[in-house]
Image (cartoon, helix red, strand yellow):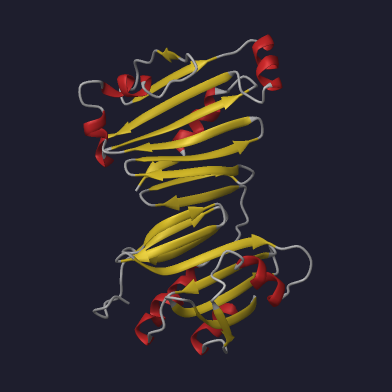
Amino acid sequence: MTSTGVIPSWQDISWNGISFQVPATWQPVVILNDYLLFEDQYRPIFELKWQQIKGSFSVERILKQLRSSGSKKDSIKARSIPQEWQQLLTPFNCYTFEWQGEKNYGTGLLRHCPDCNLTILLQFYMDDPQHEPVCLHILQTLRCHQETDRLGWSIYDIAFSLPVVAKLQAQEFHTGRYRISFQLGELFFSLLRFKPAEALLSNIGLTGFGQQLLQHGEEYVVRDEDSQLACWRKEGNSWLRFKKKLRRQQADHFLCLRHLPEHNVILGVQAKSNQPIDEKVVQTLLQNYWAN
């Protein structure tokens, strides 16, 4: 609940294998491959960290590993599982606790899924009965695996779907500019997001804006059928691919941008490889990438 006791609207979060819902007012302020921290009104409110474990489930060992980045002054005190949580946690191995840091305190949960062997550490920076419905909703919507060959992602105002075998490499979230990078076999690609599109495209258009992103001599691919789509590519020969491979670089490059006027945003895919890049693969990545 909010400070006024009103049930909040929710936002979907899906990131690197887990998904859940949090209040729409909560903002992710730290986004790593296996860690998310949310703030509400510029104060920490919720964090979670997850990892695949090897061997048997051990509360002591996993807590030590998962919280290795925490303050040494943090203290943990075991607590019984709240009655409202018990039905939601029945399929999992769980440990609940109260925690006290130097400046913050709250309730925590360590949840291990025996099906996918993923352990998730959740810490709620709140210890007020009025927050219980929010905690309960997060646990109700928390998912750690799905039985499909594609994985959904959703963060801030973007969402996309990728093959489950795509591996997250890096992420950058700056005001007006996002870049999330992946590896899919021999293909390295980044999903791009730029906003506000109206200001960025003023006087230069989509092709002019795209020219500013080119770094490898990519050439414009002429298209007449869609004025909101622009693409550039560079194809290396076998000798160049061999040289680049020795230097751990890529010879083939592809950039594709789409302007979505209804969202005032530019979405894009920037790909590189030492194998010929299939344009259909890039277009499929872009088709499965959208703005909320």
Q: How many marks?
A: 0
Please determine whether, in this image, residue 138 is positioned above or below residue 179.
below
- Camera-side residue: 119 or 151? 119
Identified at 69% across, 76% down, the residue is 59
Residue at 29%, 75% (x, y): give it: 2
Residue 78 seen anywhere in this rendered image of the structure: yes
Nearest the viewer among 75 and 274 is: 75
In the displayed structure, 219 sits above or below 246; it is above
Closer to the camera in the image, 44 or 191: 44
Q: Residue furthest right?
A: 55
- Residue 55 lies, in percent from the top left, at 79, 66
Which residue is drawn at the image coordinates 56% and 76% (left, top)? Answer: 109
User: Which quadrant holds residue 251?
Assistant: top right
Residue 260: x %, y % from top left: 30, 35
State the image quarter where residue 4 is shown: bottom left
Residue 39 image point, x, y percent = 37, 64
Residue 42 located left or right of residue 268: left
Confirm whether residue 90 shows in the render. Answer: no
Is residue 218 rendered to the left or right of residue 109?
left
Q: Position of residue 68 (x, y in %)?
A: 61, 66
Residue at coordinates 56% horizontally, 86% vertically from top-left?
81
Is residue 200 shown left or right of residue 18?
A: left
